[in-house]
Structures are given as structure tokens and as C-alpha cells.
Image (tube, rainbow, N blue to C red):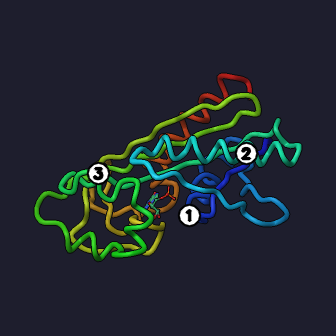
């Protein structure tokens, strides 16, 4: 089974990537150095892809410092974009979740509730960098619902859902089938297959 190193401190992201890739024969492992997730500095920018590219650049330097440059490495950056609040929380999604939480987002919204998630997944193949973008359109729920998932999952209802459940009310596989991350990672998987990785 091929191994894909995933540079992330987020257990939810890791679980989603493992759910998606293990049936396809890929073993997704958290990237660690001496048992620790390495510290990565995120640049101040309003573009998710720029953030993810900065992370992969640091990750590749770390691989090189370990003599592991030929291994693959995945980073990804995601954000929630709410139409009624342009560019918000966007690249500040993690900070906003920590400060006002899902409850705070609900307090800011009125009738206009459309939103989307975006993911920029960036892969170091061992030789080159490839970028994959995934998007999931949906809306913000009227209240917090569901116990599964992480982050904004309890307030996000994807459009592909015909019964108004939030991501946090869906099994992992169902979320992955339509999620921004699932779409970006499936594109990445297709790339790996096509390129004989
Ligand atoms: P980052 O990609 O780790 O910077 O994610 C930014 C923020 O968005 C974090 O607070 C995550 O919890 C949240 N987030 C990222 N992906 C998802 C998702 O699939 N569902 C819900 N929240 C997410």
C-alpha cells in the first residue's frame, strides 16, 4: 500500500482523507518528525491557494532535511465563504471559529444564508508540486445540528443534500462524497492514478 504523508494537526481532516483514500489502496499518515507535528507558519493573505503553497514549501524543506524528499506530502487549506458576509470568514475561518464559533456566525445572519466551502489541496509528488481545488455549495443552517464532523460542520447544509441535514448529521462517507475536501482529494487521486504514482 502506498503512503501519503499529510501535514495537518486537524484530526477531522486526517480522518476524512483516510476514509477517502484507504479503499483506493493509499495509506494516509500524519506527517510527523520524531513523533511531533512540525510547526508551520501561515502567511497573511486572502488566498487559500497561496496559504497552501506556503505550507507545502515549508513541508518540502522539512522532508529534505530528513532525507525524505522522494516521499509524497499533502497539505490542504479550507475556508467557509458566506455570501452575505463577503470574504468572511474565508481565510480567517479558523480564527473566527475560535473567537465567535458557530453560534456567532448564526447571530450575524438574516434570510440570505447561501455559502460555500473551498479547499486548496497541494501535493508534493516527490518531484513536483500539484494544486487541486474543491468547492461545495450550500447554505448556513438556522441552528446548530449534529454531532459528527468538525469545525463548521454543524451549521453547513450542502446543496446536494435533499433532506436539509448538516455535514455534522452525515456519516463521514456521505460528507466526503460531496464535500469540498472530498472533491479536491478525488481530483488528486485521479491525478495520482493517471500519472502512475
Ligand atoms: P484550515 O484549513 O485548517 O485553516 O481550516 C480553517 C477552518 O475551517 C478551521 O477552523 C476548520 O475547522 C474549518 N474547516 C475546514 N474544513 C472544514 C470542513 O470540512 N467542515 C467544517 N469546518 C471546516
Q: In the displayed structure, does residue 34 sit left or right of residue 14? A: right
The 10 Å Cα crowd at callout 1, few under 14, some 14 to 19, many 20 or more, is: some
Residue drawn at x 39%, y 65% as measured from the top left: 152
CA distance for labels 2 and 3: 32 Å
Q: Label 3: how many residues lie within 10 Å, few (<14), some (14-19) or many (20+)?
A: some
Most extreme residue toward the front is 44
SS assignment at label 2: strand
Residue in view at x 48 percent, y 41 percent: 49
Give x and y (percent) for residue 122: 59, 40
**Vertical arrangement, residue 18 with respect to residue 154, above or below:** above
Q: How far apart are marks 3 and 1 (CA)?
A: 24 Å
Q: Residue 87 carries which label?
A: 3
Q: Is residue 38 visible to us here?
A: yes
Vertical arrangement, residue 3 with respect to residue 111, above or below: above
Q: For mark 1, what is the residue?
A: 12
Q: Quadrant of residue 103?
A: bottom left
Check disc 1 and report its element: helix, strand or loop: helix
Which of 26 and 96 lies nearest the eye of the viewer? 96
Mark before the other along the chain sequence, 3 or 1: 1
User: Percent x, y for residue 162?
Assistant: 27, 53
Image quadrant in which you'd find residue 197: top right
Of the two numbered discs 1 and 2 on the same chain, state the one appearing first in sequence. Answer: 2
Tell me which residue sits at (42%, 44%) in the image.
47
Amino acid at each position: 500500500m502506498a503512503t501519503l504523508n499529510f501535514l495537518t494537526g486537524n484530526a477531522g481532516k486526517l480522518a476524512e482523507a483516510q476514509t477517502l483514500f484507504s479503499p483506493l489502496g493509499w495509506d494516509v499518515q500524519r506527517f510527523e518528525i520524531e513523533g511531533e507535528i512540525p510547526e508551520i507558519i501561515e502567511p497573511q493573505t486572502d488566498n487559500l491557494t497561496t496559504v497552501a503553497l506556503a505550507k507545502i514549501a515549508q513541508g518540502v524543506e522539512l522532508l529534505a532535511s530528513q532525507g525524505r524528499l522522494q516521499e509524497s506530502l499533502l497539505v490542504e487549506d479550507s475556508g467557509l465563504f458566506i455570501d452575505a458576509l463577503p470574504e468572511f470568514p474565508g481565510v480567517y475561518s479558523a480564527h473566527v471559529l475560535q473567537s465567535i464559533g458557530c453560534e456567532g456566525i448564526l447571530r450575524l445572519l438574516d434570510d440570505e444564508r447561501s455559502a460555500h466551502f473551498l479547499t486548496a489541496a497541494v501535493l508534493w509528488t516527490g518531484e513536483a508540486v500539484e494544486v487541486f481545488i474543491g468547492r461545495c455549495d450550500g447554505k448556513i443552517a438556522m441552528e446548530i445540528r449534529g454531532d459528527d464532523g468538525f469545525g463548521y460542520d454543524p451549521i453547513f447544509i450542502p446543496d446536494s443534500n435533499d433532506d436539509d441535514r448538516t455535514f455534522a448529521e452525515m456519516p463521514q462517507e456521505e460528507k466526503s462524497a460531496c464535500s469540498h475536501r472530498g472533491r479536491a482529494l478525488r481530483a488528486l487521486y485521479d491525478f495520482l492514478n493517471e500519472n502512475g504514482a
